[in-house]
Amino acid sequence: MTATAAPRLAERTWGGALSLALRLVLLLALVLIVLQSALVVHARPQDLVTGVKGMADMLAGKKVKVIWNQSGGGHSWPNWQVYLSKYTPLLFRD
């Protein structure tokens, strides 16, 4: 083995270990996202509203301007059409 071959072997070993560690972290994150999504899907609607309303109240208590709009229909396209036309101008005003 030459002197230049040893560092290259070490770099490859560390690179492989870091790559494997990164893949495992990403896999774990994906599993957690799927589990969280499954819990939200099976949550009762009133629990979701309570959580979102609690967050809005907490932000308002910290003097963050919050616009609360509770509506039915979930994440349907007709709702999003209304939300986009109503709230997008608020993001881009002077």
Image: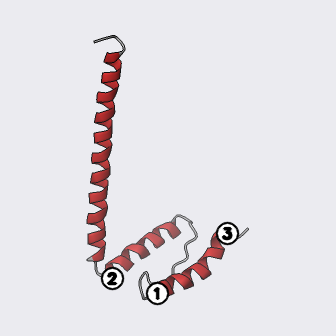
**Mark 2: few/some/many CA within 10 Å (<14, 14-19, 20+):** few
In the figure, is residue 72 to the left or right of 7? right
Q: Amino acid at mark 2?
A: Pro
Q: Residue 30's spot in the image, x, y percent?
A: 30, 57
Marks 3 and 1, the one that precedes in the sequence: 1
Q: Is residue 58 above or below residue 70?
A: above
Instruction: Identify residue for label 1.
Output: 71
**Mark 3: few/some/many CA within 10 Å (<14, 14-19, 20+):** few
Marks 2 and 1, the one that precedes in the sequence: 2
Q: Residue 49's spot in the image, x, y percent?
A: 38, 79
Residue 4 is drawn in which quadrant?
top left
Residue at 73% x, 68% y is 94
Mark on residue 45?
A: 2
Gap in Å between the C-alphas at discs 3 and 2? 31 Å
Gap in Å between the C-alphas at discs 3 and 1? 23 Å
Q: Amino acid at mark 1?
A: Ser
Viewer-nearest residue: 32 or 6: 6
Instruction: Identify residue for label 3.
Output: 92
Gap in Å between the C-alphas at discs 2 and 1? 12 Å
